[in-house]
Structure formats: C-alpha cells, structure tokens
Image (spheres, grey):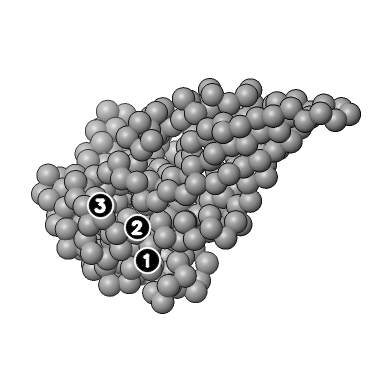
C-alpha cells in the first residue's frame, strides 16, 4: 500500500460508517449503517453526459448494486469513501441480421477512493459488451451485463477495504492527536466524529479512540449544557407562562444527564413546574432527560458519541462530492 496515503489528514466530519471485513479481526455481529464503511456511488456529470440518455442513471445504479451486494452499501452522513467509474466506448458494430442489431464494446474502469484526502485506493478495468436493436439498447445491455459478483471485481473491493483498514491501523496515534488538537480548538463535535470514524474491526485503535472520545464528549456536553440552560432561562424569564415554559422545554430537553450543569437544569425545571402548577392548577408536562437503567452505560455513551458525529455531518454540505468532476482521480 502507498504509505503516503492520507498523510494530509482531512478526517471525516461526521460519523464514518464501520464495516465487516473478512480478516481475522472481524466481528461476527451484523452492524447497521452506522457501524460499517459505506461506499457512496458517484458518477461525474462529465462521464454521464458522454453516455446515451438514461444510461448515466443505469451506471450509477450499477455502482450502488456493486457496493450493496458486496456489503458496502448503505446511507452515511458524510460520503468520505466513494465508488465511481469512467466509461469509454471501445468499439461498436452493426450486425447484419433480421432485424439489424447494434453491438457495443465498453471499457469500464472502476475506482474506490478517499474523497477527503483525494487518494485513489484501487482501480479495476472491466470490458462490458452488449447487443440491442438500437445503439442505446446496446449500451443498456452492456451496462446491465456488469455482474456485481464478478470475482475480479470482488477482489478489487476486498483490496480497497484492506487499504482503508491498514490506514487506520498504522495511523491510530495520529488520529487521536488530531482529535485532541481539534478539542483544544473547542471543535468538540468534529473531534468526536474523528475518533469514532475508526472501524470497529480495528480493535486496538477502535478501543483507544473510544477512550479518547470520553473526556472530549464530557467537554462537549458541558458546553452545550451551559448554552441550553442559558437559553432556557432567557425564554422563561421573558415569558413566565405556558409559551415560555414550552420554549424553555425545547432547550432543557437537549441537556445530557451527565453534563456538569444538569442539577441547575433540574432546579430551573422545578421552578417552572411550580409556577405552571400555580397558574394552571396542573403539573407541567415535561421531564428532563434521564438515564435508562435498562441500557448498558458504555453502550449509551457510544450511541451518544455517534449522535454527535451524525448531527455534525448533517449540518455540513452534502452535495460537494456529487458535484466534483473527480479530475484528481481520472
């Protein structure tokens, strides 16, 4: 593997999905989309526009099928890892028959890449052939004949996954250092997303990253607690009535039970409840977030880390990767 891969680290700004690999480090449980690496299907306009009408969508759908049928499909808040393709027409012929048929020969080159570091992780060349009554139908036939379970294509994907894993395994210390630097800049949500981007199959690095995420997460929820508590107080002080109580509840409901100012949030909740009882002669229908005793504490924390990463990614531009012409790749 190219050891320069990712030296300029632009780690994902949201939760990067983990994936199940076939090596000895694999976990046997089935992980959801937030637990795997997902390859996002991308087909640049410059490729799609060179294909007959409708064939661009067929090619993009084929990329999605290839990812899904090889365990790399799904949704992700941030499309860091992509699968794309370039399609070049090699040859076309008219077959003299009744009716006349068109035959097409396409050179399809597949790429798996890290969009953030602009790094090519693997390339695979495939010849697609198709026959149809028109040139467009021949194109459609050729593209549909691409088999997602092709053995060489699967080997290409496996090698690309191995490179991704090797990157995390060899750069774990740097990833943690980068996250700590982001934390010092008070970019807590990005720091957390950086740490939980490590695939679970990289057991040692995954464990170290979760441990490093804990103190940063505490800083994050403490900061968010202060902000939400202040907003709740302002809302209540401005309108000490049902309207103000409802507005305050929006902010109080975001406070994590482990945050440093949680007790202050409890006191404000009691104050509002007492006032609402006096005004309306009924209990205020609001409760602060509390621990669920039925959920393992460590599991709850990991889910909380993931929620931070997903929330951060959701607020980032989602269409950058789809607009990129990928000239840096091919």
Q: Secondary structure at mark 3?
A: loop
Nearer to us in this view, 233 or 291: 291
Q: Which residue is mark 3?
A: 5
Give the x, y percent position of residue 180: 14, 55
Q: Nearer the viewer, residue 143 or 62?
A: 143
- How far is mark 1 from mark 2, CA to CA? 12 Å
**52 or 293, which is in the foreground?**
52
In the rendering, which numbered label is found on residue 200? Answer: 1
Q: Residue at the spot x=25%, y=52% of the render? A: 5
Disc on the earlier residue, 3 or 1 = 3
- Image location of residue 195, percent across then percent down: 26, 57
* Badge 2 element: helix
Identify the mark nearer the N-term, 1 or 2: 2
Q: CA distance from mark 3 to mark 1?
A: 20 Å
The Cα atoms of the two marked residues, 2 and 3, are separated by: 9 Å
Q: Secondary structure at mark 1?
A: loop
In the rendered image of this protein, does residue 299 appear above or below residue 83? below
Query: Earlier along the polypeptide chain: callout 2 or callout 3?
Result: 3
Give me the residue at 89% from left, 29% from top: 98
* Residue 313 left/right relative to 129: left
Residue farthest front in this picture: 96
């Amino acid at each position: 593997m190219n050891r320069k891969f990712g030296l300029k680290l632009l780690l994902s700004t949201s939760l990067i999905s983990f994936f199940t690999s076939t090596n000895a480090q694999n976990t046997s449980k089935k992980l959801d989309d937030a637990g795997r690496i997902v390859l996002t299907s991308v087909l640049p306009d410059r490729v799609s526009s060179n294909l007959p009408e409708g064939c661009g969508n067929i090619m993009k759908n084929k990329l999605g099928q290839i990812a899904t049928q090889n365990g790399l499909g799904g949704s992700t808040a941030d499309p860091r890892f992509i699968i794309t393709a370039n399609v070049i027409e090699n040859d076309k012929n008219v077959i003299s028959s009744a009716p006349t048929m068109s035959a097409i020969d396409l050179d399809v080159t597949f790429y798996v890449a890290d969009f953030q570091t602009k790094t090519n992780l693997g390339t695979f060349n495939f010849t697609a052939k198709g026959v149809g009554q028109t040139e467009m139908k021949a194109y459609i036939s050729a593209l549909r004949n691409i088999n997602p379970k092709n053995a060489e294509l699967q080997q290409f994907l496996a090698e690309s996954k191995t490179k991704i894993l090797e990157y995390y395994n060899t750069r774990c210390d740097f990833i943690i250092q980068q996250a700590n630097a982001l934390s010092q800049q008070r970019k807590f949500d990005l720091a957390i997303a950086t740490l939980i981007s490590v695939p679970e199959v990289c057991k040692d690095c995954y464990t170290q990253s979760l441990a490093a995420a804990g103190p940063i997460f505490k800083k994050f929820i403490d900061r968010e607690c202060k902000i939400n508590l202040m907003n709740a107080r302002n809302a209540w002080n401005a309108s000490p009535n049902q309207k103000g109580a409802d507005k305050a509840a929006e902010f109080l409901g975001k406070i994590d039970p482990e945050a440093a100012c949680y007790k202050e949030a409890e006191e404000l909740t009691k104050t509002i409840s007492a006032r609402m009882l006096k005004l309306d002669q009924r209990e205020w229908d609001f409760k602060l977030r509390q621990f669920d005793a039925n959920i393992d504490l460590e599991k709850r924390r990991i889910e909380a880390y993931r929620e931070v990463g997903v929330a951060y990614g959701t607020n980032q531009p989602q269409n950058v990767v789809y607009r990129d012409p990928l000239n840096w790749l091919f």
